[in-house]
Image (tube, grey):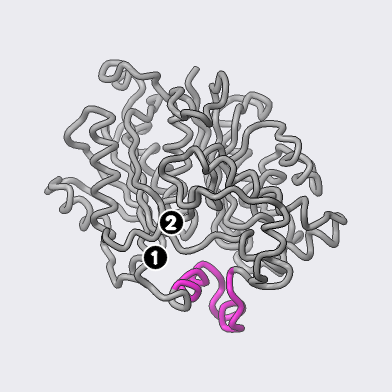
Amino acid sequence: MRRVAVVGVGCTKVGELWDKSLKDLAVESATKALDDAGVERVDFVYVGNAYSQILQSQGNLGSFIVDSLGFNGTPSISIEAADSSGSLAFHEAYKAVKLGWANYVLVVGVEKMSDSTPEEVAKALMACEDQDYVAFTGITQAGLHALVLRLYMERFRIKHEDVAMFTVKAHKNALNNPYAQFKNPLSVEDVLKSPILADPLRLLEYTTIADGSAALILCPLEEAKKITDKPVVEVLGSASATDKFYLPERIDSLTFNATVEAAKKAFQEAKISIDKVDFIETHDNSTIMGVISIEDLGFAEKGRGTTFIVEEKIPINTMGGSKGRGHPIGATGVYQLVETVWQLRGEAGKNQVKDAKIGLTHTLTGIGNLAAVNILGCL
């Protein structure tokens, strides 16, 4: 099996991009990635998207985007896994190159949400949960996150302001990201005084509607060394895992075993220990999901995630994460990977992590029923 590298990356700004369509966003990011890689065509295209079939009534995105790029005849696959759509598209593309099925592969993550009403988006977000036993009750994703937040604070006797620090640090990092949706610094007081979405979850603890697209090019490591003079970023490990779909059926509602298992498999493939990771781009569509993710990935003990974040033991969500950069859901996993490549190449500007050699990305679908973990390195 072959070693695999990321040889080109690109993305659009994240925000409510009223003047751009789903197609416009995908083509913009893909073109940037192709230009960055210095290639004109690819052998395969993988597209990650969560809600185009619901919000735009647009399916068959793989063929749609291939045609939009003028790659007639190029095989394509579109992947839907809610928040992990982009990460899984990358995972499948990585396998295609690793196993020799393709030499150059384009991965595009894209989401267009701003043209839909908040009610339509809220309903779409529940598509990743059990429709018979959860969604039918009328609860929203924000409501589910609020339940997890309350349980976490009560079990571990954690103050809400400590959890809210996740948002504060995310917005601080987003200030220097030219592609970020939110460029406003926040204080803990700002977060806790913001309106309640679902008690105790506050508005500024949760992501909002966002459009955006990110893309990257994968190829064999040896080929990458020939075509680029930039630092070559290798995919060291990539894995996904699932958990019980229905949250109350799990042994512990505050441990997402999908993350635990995906991280274990990714580290095994990468053949490195957790202390070798220099920075983390983790799932944080709410503050509490970010805190729990840090714990489940193995960087902090249960109930100690807030301490890890406050003390900044290693950099987290260096370009703002979902809360600061924005969360165009099907594209988020690819944004994480693009930002990781920037860090490893030394292209992250004012947010550059000193001597960054290994970065980890992590996405989580819904309330933890699926997770994906990727480890990239520039060694």
Q: In this view, does 43 lie to the left or right of 247?
A: left
Q: Are marks 2 and 1 in contact (CB under 8 Å)?
A: yes
Asked if the magenta segment contains residue 123, the reply would be yes
Task: Measuring from the top left, give residue 72's x and y in whole percent.
Answer: 12, 48
Q: In which quarter of the image is the N terminus?
A: top left
Q: Residue at x 38, y 66 (%)?
A: 114
Does residue 292 appear anywhere in the picture?
Answer: no
Task: Measuring from the top left, give residue 25's x and y in whole percent.
Answer: 29, 53
Kind of residue indicated by mark 1: Met
Q: Residues within 10 Å of mark 2 (few under 14, many from 20)?
A: many
- Relative height, residue 132 to residue 251 (above, below): below
Q: Mark 2 points at which residue?
A: 328
Q: Which residue is drawn at 67% across and 48% down?
A: 166
Q: Mark 1: which secondary structure?
A: loop
Q: Residue at x 72, y 32 (%)?
A: 313
Residues rendered magenta in the picture: 121-141
Q: Residues within 10 Å of mark 1 (few under 14, many from 20)?
A: many
Q: On the image, which quarter does residue 17 sit in?
A: bottom left
Q: Which residue occupies the extreme bottom position in the image?
A: 137
Task: Measuring from the top left, give residue 81's x and y in whole percent.
Answer: 45, 58
Q: Mark 1 points at which residue?
A: 113
The foreground one among 339 and 233 is 339
- Relative height, residue 341 to residue 55 (above, below): above
Q: Residue at x 59, y 48 (%)?
A: 185
**Rounded to the nearest whole Å, what is the CA distance between mark 2 and mark 1?**
8 Å
Kind of residue indicated by mark 2: Pro
Asked if the magenta segment contains residue 37, the reply would be no
The foreground one among 213 and 239 is 213
Q: Mark 2: which secondary structure?
A: loop
Task: Measuring from the top left, give residue 62's x and y in whole percent.
Answer: 26, 55
Q: Is residue 45 left or right of residue 319?
A: left
- Relative height, residue 156 to residue 375 (above, below): below
